[in-house]
Structures are given as C-alpha cells and as structure tokens.
Image: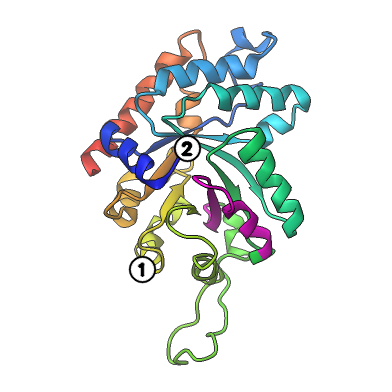
Amino acid sequence: MNRKQLIEQIRSKRSYLCVGLDTDLHKIPKHLQSQPDALFEFNKQIIDATLDLCVAYKINTAFYEAMGLKGWEAMERTVNYIPNTHFTIADAKRGDIGNTSSQYAKAFFETLHFDAITIAPYMGEDSVKPFFGYENKWGIVLGLTSNPGSKDFEQLKLDVPVGVDTSQASEYLYERVLKNVCQWGDPGNLMFVIGATKASDLADIRKIIPDHFLLVPGVGFQGGSLEEVSRFGMNADCGLLVNVSRAIIYAGETENFAQEARAIALQYQQEMSNFL
C-alpha cells in the first residue's frame, strides 16, 4: 500500500485506528482454545468485526513465533485473510547486518506479504536500508518508545554535533535517530514508532519529522491519551496510525467476544472522527 492509498483509507473511514493482533492463546476465549487453529479463528472473528472501523492491523510476531510452526502458519493465514484495503504491519523489530536484514525483508515482504515491518535502528544504516528497497512497502523505525526502559538509551543526552551552536541544548539519542534515519527513507516508505505515553514530546518530534507517518502504540491499557496524541501528533495528512491491542481484542471473554471488540473499536473510531 502506498501513502496516497493509506491517506484515502483514513479519510474515507474517518479513522486512523490500527488494531493490534497480539494474540495470546491463553487469553482468548476458552471455547476457542481447543480448536485446531485457535489463533487464526480468533483473529478472523476480530478482523470481521472491526474491518470497517480501522485502517490497519499490526501483528506482533512474537506471539506467533513462540508457538513454532503452528504459530507461524496462523500468522501467515491471518495476514492473507486481511484484505488489501487495509495496511498490514509485522511488528517484528528486525534489524541486523545488511545481508541478514535483506533476508528479513524478503521473509516479511515477499513470503508473508506484509505492507510494513518495524525495525530496530541501532546497528545503523546498512541494517535498515534493505527494508526500503521494495515498492509500496514500509519500514517503521523505533523512535521514542513507551516502555520504562526507553530512558536507558533512547533518552540519553548526546553531545552537540560538530558545527552546531554550542549554546544550544544537546539532543537526545532518539532525536539523532529521527534525523539520521530520515536520510535513508522518505515519507512514502518510512514511518516511526512513537509511544503514546510520550505524547507531550510529540510537538517537538513533529518539528523534526513533520511529514512522516507515526505508528503510535500505548493508547488503551498503557494509559496513553488519544486526544493528546491527536492534538500534538497529527499533520495535514493525519500522519498517525494509533495502535490499540488488548483493549479491543480482549474486550470480551465469552462467545460474544467479537461483538464486544467491535464496540470498543467503534468508540475509538468515533473519537478519531472528531479529530479529523
């Protein structure tokens, strides 16, 4: 999916909701757990119930990889079930030396046919650029994440770069990442992960990357504010994909779980419509 198509979906649905399929076999309704392909059956019903309310689905690959071949097959069936009207994200956080990243890109873009993959950038340019070699595919690079450990590296202060007025405050590591990675991709194939619990930093982040889309996790169970994310993070094209996982997919525990998931997704969509 290209940028124009994504923007059209956002505008037509008046939604920038991304439903996170972080599907844990032990958390899905008990009546599904004994089925031969329980993960896919759960995902299928969630997708059917939310398709008209969201523009994207994010599959956290760890929940599937942990189950070995059976989980990998459920992930493949899930991404193949999602129609091409929706943006699909492999939340895999890959990033390795260039030839290894090339194989990761092939796995998720050619074999599994995702539109995008999340990338850890800390091995540098050669570990990231292989993901930008595909037409209408996206790399989503970790910028400022919402986990407590983000302070260990992402929020470290760096020395002022050579040639910059030394009276200026030093920059954070994540700010250097945003600036440098922007030179490796463009707003048509590069997004950044910015955690919703860092919403107060979004205004400053938008000064660095005004045009790029942001994938924003952390709304819902992690306490992020959709209103703040929208106010500080939105640009002229919306520029946001707000991911909600547990609050939607685990909204219900009975056979009506899909309808209950839809009800929560509808609440998010209606709120988003007011911000667009």
Residue 221 is tagged as 2
At horizontal 46% and vertical 48% (from top left) the residue drawn is 215
Magenta residue check for 129: yes
The answer to whether 52 is drawn above or below residue 192 in the figure is: above
The answer to whether 261 is drawn above or below residue 22 in the figure is: above
Q: Nearer the viewer, mark 1 or mark 2?
A: 1
Q: Is residue 37 visible?
A: yes
The answer to whether 269 is drawn above or below residue 151 in the figure is: above
- Please, what is the three-letter code of the amino acid marked with disc 2? Phe
Residue 152 is tagged as none
Magenta stretch?
126-146
Quarter assignment of residue 67:
top right
Taking depth in this image into account, of 201 and 115 the one nearest to the observer is: 115
Q: Position of residue 86 (x, y in %)?
A: 43, 32
Q: Position of residue 217 (x, y in %)?
A: 48, 45
Which residue in the protein does label 1 denote? 207
Q: Is residue 196 visible?
A: no
- Please, what is the three-letter code of the amino acid marked with disc 1? Lys
Quarter assignment of residue 156:
bottom right
Taking depth in this image into account, of 100 and 39 the one nearest to the observer is: 100
Q: Residues within 10 Å of mark 2 (few under 14, many from 20)?
A: few
Q: Residues within 10 Å of mark 1 (few under 14, many from 20)?
A: few
Taking depth in this image into account, of 113 and 79 the one nearest to the observer is: 113
